[in-house]
Image (cartoon, rainbow, N blue to C red):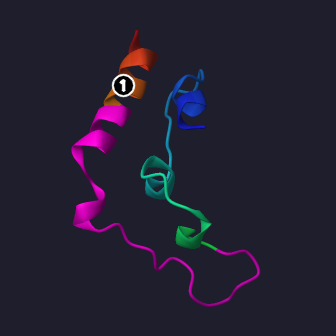
Amino acid sequence: MIEAVWNSDAVVAMTTMQDLLGLGSETRFNRPGTATGNWRWRATADAFDPDIAERLRRVTDRMIR
């Protein structure tokens, strides 16, 4: 999905950190119909690693070319 967004004709492309990190639905920001517990998920420093950075670089490089 990230590649499809990056390859679109949009001027700005965005994704959530959960999607970039390949996390599951348990890390959703917002659960529709739920009044509490939303917007609490936070990325920790150990979630960011060279593999994630390389994946984003590859997708972005393909988009630019």
- Rendered location of residue 6, percent (x, y): 51, 29
- Rendered location of residue 56, percent (x, y): 36, 35
Q: How many labels does the image show?
A: 1
Residue type at tag 1 = Arg
Residue 25 lies left or right of residue 49; in this view the side is: right
- Rendered location of residue 9, percent (x, y): 59, 21
Q: Which residue sits at x=73%, y=75%?
A: 32
Residue range in magenta is 31-56
Q: Which residue sits at x=55%, y=22%?
A: 7
- Rendered location of residue 33, percent (x, y): 77, 81
| The residue positioned farthest toward the bottom in the image shown | 36
Nearer to the camera, 6 or 47? 47
Which residue has dot 1 on it? 58
Nearer to the camera, 44 or 16? 44
Residue 21 lies left or right of residue 48; in this view the side is: right
The correct choice, above or below, for 22 with respect to 42 in the image is above
Whether the magenta-drawn stretch holds residue 40 is answered as yes
Tell me the quadrant of the picture where the C terminus can be found. top left
| The quarter of the displayed image where residue 10 is located | top right
Residue 29 lies left or right of residue 48; in this view the side is: right
